[in-house]
Image (cartoon, rainbow, N blue to C red):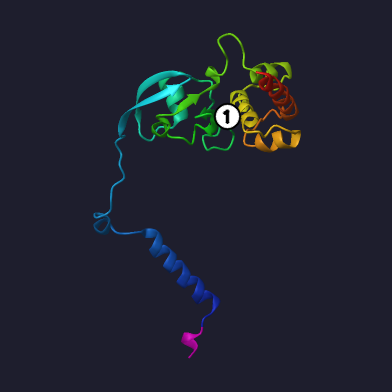
């Protein structure tokens, strides 16, 4: 009867044996039928309308819009921060709405109007949000600034800039490691007044 009693040592040794057998995985003969991951990139020619200009570019189907903008079109204003959709430095507008370009595939952006920070100004005339960021010193190192500006414009268009609390909430996806948040809020408020006049 004693051999059937479970004790701590038996449970632990059984658990270790089971875990070891699971982690070893299938033998090479068992793995022959497994599907091999695709190692070769699949290239595709895509048409991207960026800042009102059509571009035909050859991209890997796995390439993000951010990488296509920076590497294929030399539009480096959208920054590659975390590359995981957490910092907002890569924010662009697609069809008038803000999107994180590091999480958007270039092939998925076809057929949509894409606006980057480079296309926000009207020639030499700065967009009201760009001017407000200068007026309120709403940037320090400047790395997050393009994403902040693009989100700020969208925040106003979406109707989420009616109070400091709303602005902070709807801009919370854009991180500023220099902590210029009060200045950013002030800039969005100023730009809202200017944008409503236009």
Compared to 198, does 38 lie above or below? below
Left or right: 114 in relation to 107: right
Q: How many marks?
A: 1
**1 vs 150, nearest the viewer:** 150
Can you name the residue that lies furthest to the front here? 197
**74 vs 195, nearest the viewer:** 195
Left or right: 16 in relation to 180: left
Quarter of the figure with residue 72: top left
Find residue 31 and report its horizontal and vertical position in percent.
Answer: 27, 55
Left or right: 129 in relation to 94: right
Which type of secondary structure does the marked residue at label 1 adopt? loop
Compared to 55, does 8 lie above or below? below
Residue 161 makes an appearance in the image: yes
Can you name the residue that lies furthest to the bottom here? 1
Find residue 121 and report its horizontal and vertical position in percent.
Answer: 57, 15
In the picture of the structure, the residue carrying the numbered disc 1 is 89
Left or right: 178 in relation to 8: right
**Residue at point 47% right, 69% down?**
15
Assign the C terminus to one quadrant of the image: top right
**Magenta stretch containing residue 78, yes or no?**
no
Quarter of the figure with residue 45: top left
> In this picture, which residue range is highlighted in magenta?
1-5
**Magenta stretch containing residue 4, yes or no?**
yes
Q: Residues within 10 Å of mark 1 (few under 14, many from 20)?
A: many
């Amino acid at each position: 009867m004693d051999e059937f009693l479970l004790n701590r040592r038996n449970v632990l040794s059984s658990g270790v044996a089971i875990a070891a057998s699971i982690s070893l995985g299938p033998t090479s003969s068992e793995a022959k039928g497994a599907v091999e991951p695709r190692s070769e990139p699949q290239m595709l020619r895509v048409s991207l309308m960026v800042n009102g200009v059509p571009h035909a570019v050859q991209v890997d189907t796995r390439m993000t819009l951010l990488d296509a903008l920076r590497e294929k079109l030399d539009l480096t204003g959208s920054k590659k921060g975390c590359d995981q959709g957490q910092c907002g430095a890569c924010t662009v507008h697609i069809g008038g709405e803000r999107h994180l370009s590091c999480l958007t595939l270039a092939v998925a952006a076809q057929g949509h109007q894409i606006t980057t920070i480079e296309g926000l100004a009207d020639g030499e005339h700065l967009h009201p949000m760009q001017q407000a960021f200068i007026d309120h010193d709403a940037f320090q190192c400047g790395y997050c600034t393009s994403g902040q500006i693009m989100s700020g414009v969208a925040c106003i268009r979406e109707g989420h800039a009616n109070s400091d609390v709303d602005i902070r909430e709807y801009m919370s996806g854009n991180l500023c490691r220099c902590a210029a948040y009060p200045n950013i809020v002030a800039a969005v408020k100023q730009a809202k007044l200017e944008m409503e006049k236009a």
